[in-house]
Amino acid sequence: MATTLVILGATGDLTRRLLLPALYRLYTLDLLEPLEIVGYAMEDWSREQFIAHIKEGIPGLESHHDLKTWNEFSSHLEYRSGDLSPEKLKELGPLVPDNGIFYLALPPQLFGQAAEALGKAGLNDIQRGWRRLVIEKPFGWDLASAQVLREQIHREWDEEQVYRIDHFLGKETTQNLMVFRFANRFLEPIWNSAHIAQVQITYAETLGLEGRWRYYDAAGALRDMLQNHLMQLFTLTALEPLSVWSAEVLREHKVEVLRSVRPIPEGAVDRFAVRGQYTAGLIGGRAVPGYLQEPGIPPHSRTDTFAALKFYVDNWRWQGVPFYLRSGKRMAASYAEIAVQFRPVPGLPLGQRETPCNWLVFQIKPSEQMDLIVNAKRPGLGFEDRQVTLTTPYLQEGETEFSAYEQLLMDILEGDHAQFLRFDEVEWSWRILEPVLAAWKTGHPEPYEANSEGPAAQARLMEPGQSWRPLSGPK
């Protein structure tokens, strides 16, 4: 049976910059099953205009061989213009004769409307083949809106047809976290509160708004990064071992982690959450404006461009271990990691000062690698110690790396839900953050200078003896 991918909002940046380049690369590697691709958007374009628009986003089409491959690939592209009315969407029916995927590359406020309209147009009908609906984050703006979105989607689509995509789950480092944890026997006995002191998950960017001010000023760092991307990294770090490899078992284990998070008391949000907003500074020697001076931003905006959270997971494995999550824009470095600190060794075995703690670090950017920070003897007389970092790059020589969207698009085509969010996972992540969202409706974020480590107030989240790792990577 033929498979057709319909991209709603196909003239937008997501399609041109990420989706079609990912599909084209899979095609060049001969990994893409026969697939027809239909772009659908409001713009009254011809098929030729759409193909030319997409071609501009494909890097490296210089050689004759590349152009030949592109021409073969683009022969599978179609374009139709129209709105989100069921009547207009029904015209797509003849283009989806068998299996169908409907990818909502649309503004988030249109997700519910589009899902309902597709169903009313009969495009969710499984009589002619399977039908799948793909939704980008954000999945709502708070708990109430997420529940409304669920109701809209489920009026026409079954949960098993829905693929809530978070591209962080397609990153190699994210998937390696699970393999490294569960495929190495030596880790399981120490992956608990008896041996682990804290976990830090950081995603720092030197970038500012990059033209996304309309979306970002409504969202902020907490909604844009922590509620979805970093929450995913958190659940994968904390989940229990799986009895079998199954999408439903994996997703159930992730929900169990979220259910176990200690509720943040409404009157004590400042002990568990910090927000900041960048001011003017120098990034790479170039002067950049503060957030309130960015084009389009209201002069009194309270939007957080930095957010940090502290969680406790109240179960047997993690009792008492703080999980720290933070993300910010215009930071001192473009750096991301999942860092696990182990407790110090008992006593002073060499009759000297207390030895520093070990760290296991899964670095996401600037490069994907694993670092184990250990103590070793310093060369010379005596038994002085020093810390050394054992590093291995994730990608080995001769191996092929795939982008997050390449990974996840293949999963959608294969019907694998493992790297996609179930609704109760979305609901619980919003439920955890409800007290923070309520508290941040008043007050203002703390200013922090561009090219800094973030607001000073983030230090108050740390337990005694703990501090944030610097944004320059393992030491």
Image (cartoon, helix red, strand yellow):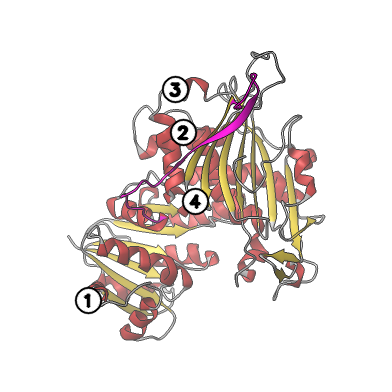
Other residues around mark 3 within 10 Å, as few (<14) / some (14–19) / many (≥20): few
Q: Earlier in the sequence, mark 1 or mark 2?
A: 1
Q: Which residue is mark 4?
A: 367
Dominant secondary-structure state across the stretch colored magenta: loop
Taking the magenta stretch, the answer to whether it contains residue 402 is yes
Which residue is drawn at the image coordinates 72% and 20% (left, top)? 353
CA gap, disc 1 and disc 3: 50 Å
Side (left or right) of 454 relative to 157: right
Residue that mark 2 sits on: 253
Distance from disc 2 to disc 3, alpha carbons, whole Å, reads 21 Å
Indicate which disc, 4 or 1, sits on the residue closer to the N terminus: 1
Residue corresponding to mark 1: 68
Residue kind at label 4, given as amino acid type: Ser
Going from N to C along the chain, the mark reached first, 4 or 3, is 3
Q: Is residue 459 magenta?
A: no
Residue carrying label 3: 186
Q: From the viewer's perspective, is the residue at label 4 or at label 3 nearer?
A: 4
Residue type, numbered disc 2: His
Type of amino acid at the residue the image marks with label 1:
Lys
Distance (Cα) linking label 4 and label 1: 33 Å
Q: Are marks 1 and 3 in contact (CB under 8 Å)?
A: no
Secondary structure of the residue carrying numbered label 1: helix
Q: Position of residue 396 (x, y in %)?
A: 36, 46
| Label 4 vs label 1, nearer the camera | 4
Corner quadrant of residue 464: top right
Q: Secondary structure at mark 3?
A: loop
Give the position of the C terminus as an image quadrant.
Answer: top right
Residue 193 bears which disc, if any? Answer: none
